[in-house]
Amino acid sequence: MNWLLVLYTLLLFVLLTPAIIVRLPQNGNKWTVAFVHGFIFTFIFYLTHNFILKISNTLEGLCTDEDPTDPDCSNSITTSGTSS
């Protein structure tokens, strides 16, 4: 299990819970507010989860320079210094 991604998801969820940082829209009913915050969470998570996953795989040693073709490690933080 990828604990860094789990912690990132938990932190993002808590921060985007209505009224923790901001409530959008401010005068909306509870369903509108829940929908807007759910959409914001989904959008931010969609844009950032691959980056967090690559960092986590690099930190755990799952991405190495030996296999640059691995789709989970492509464009990872550690890149091979060889070129053909």
Image: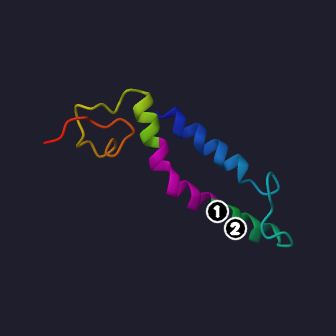
Q: In terms of depth relative to the viewer, which is nearer, 49 or 17?
A: 49
**Vertical side of 30 occupied by 70: above or below:** above
**Vertical side of 44 occupied by 36: above or below:** below
Q: Which mark is residue 9?
A: none
* Label 1 packing within 10 angstroms: few (<14), some (14-19), many (20+): some
Q: Is 39 contained in the magenta span?
A: no
- Left or right of 44 in this view: 1: left
**Number of numbered callouts drawn:** 2
- Which residue is painted at 83% across and 71% down in the image? 29
**Vertical side of 1 occupied by 28: above or below:** below
Residue matched to label 2: 36
Mark 2: secondary structure: helix
- Which residue is painted at 82% across and 72% down in the image? 28
Q: Which quadrant does the C terminus fall into? A: top left
* Label 2 packing within 10 angstroms: few (<14), some (14-19), many (20+): some
Q: Are marks 2 and 1 in contact (CB under 8 Å)?
A: yes
**Picture quadrant where residue 79 is located:** top left
Pinpoint residue 13: horizontal percent, then vertical percent. 67, 49
The amino acid on which the numbered mark 1 sits, given as a three-letter code, is: Ile
- Left or right of 57 in this view: 24: right
Residues in magenta, as a range: 41-52
**Vertical side of 67 occupied by 41: above or below:** below
Pinpoint residue 15: horizontal percent, then vertical percent. 72, 49
Residue matched to label 1: 40
How far is the residue under mark 2 from the one under mark 1?
Answer: 6 Å
- Left or right of 27 in this view: 41: left
- Which residue is painted at 66% across and 43% down in the image? 11
Identify the residue at the far left of this view: 84
Pinpoint residue 62: horizontal percent, then vertical percent. 35, 30
